[in-house]
Image: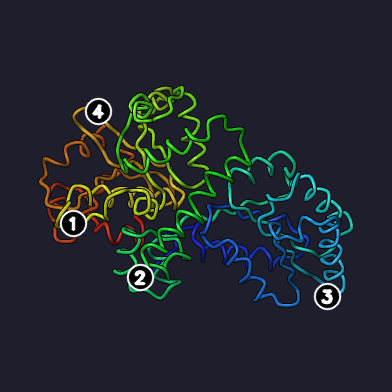
């Protein structure tokens, strides 16, 4: 199964780290960032297993990391191993738990670079926001950033040995957190895992560690409202109107940005060549992993036969999140009464995408055709059920089954 279109997938990031660690040491620090529970620790432990005695793994969130002298002891052991064995790799997991971690890391890296100690260094953290800001300020020119995002359906199939159809089904209804998959037969345990191990600590700890958030209750409410409106365009004014605790529009907009950097929710802007109009447009809200929809919504997972419209929203959300997690720039477009579900550009190319999960006619593609006429750089694409691809093709538009898109992208 092709996974080349997902550069932020677990297997792609592992391959990139293997290649970089095979180069002569010391190289640049490898900074691995990403949302909670997407397999960062598992990836580092895989490297530790592969490298054997040449590798040292430590976790900065462990109890011993708070003891005096722990940091110095770790580096002393790593440097001794590198000089005694010819080379070594130091893996520091959850490094953002260390106070002033970037300055500490800079001082140690400068030492091994100055003395040419053959030691590779890889660090990871749960929040891209934490590592990104610290790295830019203190480690300029000394690090390379690798971002691990939410798993695709193809990654789920490959790593967990699932049939592609099953992987797509699970990615739509239960999301793609790898650690949660073994709990799918125990719904309450699965919900507790996603809520207690991912959502609550990401909002209640990771973001609060990073930013001065004056209204943490409002931040949680913004997240809850976003999850309640998957793949919907919602103005900031309307968003504020649904919140129990009122907040300024600028505060709500800022909280949306934080939630996206934490890998929870994306607020898509309207596509326009004019940047000022981009800022003024109401956002389209997208949950970046379907598991959050299943956990946070008070009603059951939608069934196509009983709730076709709501099921369609979930599929649309999953397709947009798939493009976002693959590293594409994603937007929507609307000029009343016309609309395009997804406008994306990246390694897959430039596409204007309409997403359909039931019967449709050529008239339903009016927005897509209008946008493509005015923006010829973006090729039109319809994601639909396999039996309905001919409708789009008869209108001169490429069609692709949305299941295939979730597995392979739109290369």
Residue 135 placed where, x, y %? 69, 44
For label 4, count other residues whose C-alpha is less than 10 Å away and answer few (under 14), some (14-19) or many (20+): few
Q: Alpha-carbon distance for marks 2 and 1?
A: 21 Å
Q: CB atoms at circles 4 and 2 under 8 Å apart?
A: no
Q: Nearer the viewer, mark 3 or mark 2?
A: 2
Q: Secondary structure at mark 2?
A: loop
Q: Give whichever of discs 3 and 2 has the lower sequence position.
A: 3
The residue under label 2 is 185
Q: Relative to 386, say whether 232 is above or below.
A: above
Q: Alpha-carbon distance for marks 4 and 2?
A: 44 Å
Q: Nearer the viewer, residue 234 or 328?
A: 234
Q: Quadrant of the C terminus?
A: bottom left
For label 2, count other residues whose C-alpha is less than 10 Å away and answer few (under 14), some (14-19) or many (20+): few
Q: Alpha-carbon distance for marks 3 and 4?
A: 64 Å
Q: Relative to 166, say whether 139 is above or below.
A: above
Q: Alpha-carbon distance for marks 1 and 3?
A: 59 Å
Q: Give whichever of discs 3 and 4 has the lower sequence position.
A: 3
Left or right side of 275 for 118: right
Q: Nearer the viewer, mark 2 or mark 1?
A: 2
* Residue 304 circle label: 1
Q: Nearer the viewer, residue 136 or 70?
A: 70
Residue 187 placed where, x, y %? 36, 64
Q: Quadrant of residue 403?
A: bottom left
Q: CB atoms at circles 3 and 2 under 8 Å apart?
A: no
**Residue at x 11% of width, y 44% of height:** 362
The residue under label 3 is 85
For label 1, count other residues whose C-alpha is less than 10 Å away and answer few (under 14), some (14-19) or many (20+): few
Q: CB atoms at circles 1 and 3 under 8 Å apart?
A: no
The residue under label 4 is 335
Q: Give whichever of discs 1 and 4 has the lower sequence position.
A: 1
């Amino acid at each position: 199964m092709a996974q080349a279109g997902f550069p932020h997938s677990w297997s792609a990031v592992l391959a990139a780290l293997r290649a970089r660690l095979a180069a002569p040491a010391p190289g640049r620090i490898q900074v691995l960032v990403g949302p909670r529970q997407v397999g960062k620790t598992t990836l580092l432990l895989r490297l530790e297993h592969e490298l054997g005695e040449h590798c040292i793994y430590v976790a900065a969130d462990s109890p011993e990391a708070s003891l005096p002298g722990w940091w110095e002891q770790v580096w002393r052991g790593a440097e001794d191993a590198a000089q005694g064995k010819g080379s070594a790799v130091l893996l520091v997991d959850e490094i953002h738990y260390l106070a002033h971690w970037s300055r500490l890391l800079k001082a140690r890296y400068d030492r091994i670079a100055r003395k040419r100690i053959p030691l590779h260094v890889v660090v990871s953290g749960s929040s891209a926001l934490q590592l990104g800001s610290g790295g830019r300020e203190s480690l300029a020119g000394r690090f390379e950033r690798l971002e691990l995002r939410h798993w695709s359906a193809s990654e789920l199939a490959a790593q967990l040995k699932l049939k592609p159809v099953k992987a797509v089904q699970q990615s739509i209804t239960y999301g793609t957190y790898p650690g949660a998959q073994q709990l799918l037969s125990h719904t309450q345990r699965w919900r507790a895992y996603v809520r207690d191990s991912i959502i609550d600590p990401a909002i209640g700890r990771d973001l609060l560690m990073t930013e001065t958030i004056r209204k943490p209750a409002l931040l949680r409410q913004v997240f809850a409202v976003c999850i309640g409106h998957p793949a919907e365009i919602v103005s900031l004014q309307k968003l504020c109107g649904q919140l129990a605790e009122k907040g300024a529009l600028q505060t709500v907009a800022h909280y949306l940005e934080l939630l996206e950097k934490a890998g929870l929710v994306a607020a898509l802007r309207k596509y326009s060549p004019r940047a000022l109009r981009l800022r003024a447009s109401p956002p389209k809200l997208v949950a970046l992993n379907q598991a959050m929809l299943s956990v946070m919504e008070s009603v059951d997972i939608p069934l196509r036969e009983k709730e076709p419209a709501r099921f369609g929203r979930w599929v649309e959300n999953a397709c947009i999140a798939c493009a976002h997690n693959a590293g594409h720039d994603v937007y929507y477009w609307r000029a009343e009464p016309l609309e395009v579900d997804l406008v994306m550009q990246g390694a897959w190319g430039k596409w204007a995408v309409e997403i359909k999960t039931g019967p449709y006619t050529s008239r339903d593609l009016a927005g897509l055709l209008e946008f493509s006429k005015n923006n010829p750089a973006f090729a039109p694409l319809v994601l639909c059920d396999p039996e309905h691809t001919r409708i789009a093709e008869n209108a001169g538009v490429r069609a692709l089954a949305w299941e295939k898109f979730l597995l392979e992208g739109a290369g």
